[in-house]
């Protein structure tokens, strides 16, 4: 048993090759999308997510540092205010 293949015209072959390439690109895009939806199946998505997390961590560390400095300043100011208040309310007879 043998098959007879018909000769495809050049224009039709070119069109089919283009369509085939477009479909392959579409499949690749869908695979990338699937990977990203499934928890970063590809390396680029993992790296991108990792860099984003590092940036968020750095931002949180900066915020924490700023808040710690503000807290220290407020504690110092509170001690100063308490000292002034205590001096103002001291009983002159006890001194």
Image (spheres, rainbow, N blue to C red):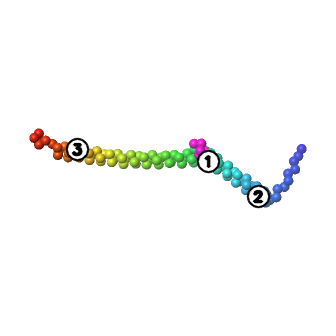
Residue found 11% across the figure and 39% down from its top: 94
Q: Position of residue 34 (x, y in %)?
A: 62, 45
70 relative to 33 in the view: left or right? left
The front one of 14 and 81 is 81
Q: Is residue 37 magenta?
A: yes
Query: What residue lies at 57% left-to-right and 47% top-to-bottom?
Result: 45
- How many callouts does the rendering have? 3
Q: Nearer the viewer, mark 3 or mark 2?
A: 3
The disc at residue 33 is 1
Q: Which residues are magenta?
A: 35-39
Counting from the top left corner in percent of width and height, residue 11 is at: 79, 60
Question: Which residue position is annotated with label 2?
Answer: 14
Q: Residues within 10 Å of mark 2 (few under 14, many from 20)?
A: few
Which residue, given by chain and number where applicable, does mark 3 sit on? Answer: 82
Residue at 88 percent of width and 46 percent of height: 2
Distance from disc 1 to disc 2, alpha carbons, whole Å, reads 29 Å
Residue that sits furthest to the bottom in the current view: 11
């Amino acid at each position: 048993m043998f098959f007879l293949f018909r000769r495809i015209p050049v224009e039709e072959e070119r069109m089919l090759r283009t369509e085939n390439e477009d479909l392959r690109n579409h499949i690749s895009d869908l695979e990338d999308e699937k990977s990203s939806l499934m928890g970063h199946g590809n390396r680029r998505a993992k790296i991108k997510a990792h860099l984003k997390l590092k940036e968020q961590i750095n931002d949180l560390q900066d915020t924490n540092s700023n808040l710690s400095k503000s807290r220290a300043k407020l504690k110092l100011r509170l001690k100063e205010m308490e000292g002034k208040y205590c001096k103002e309310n001291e009983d002159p007879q006890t001194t």
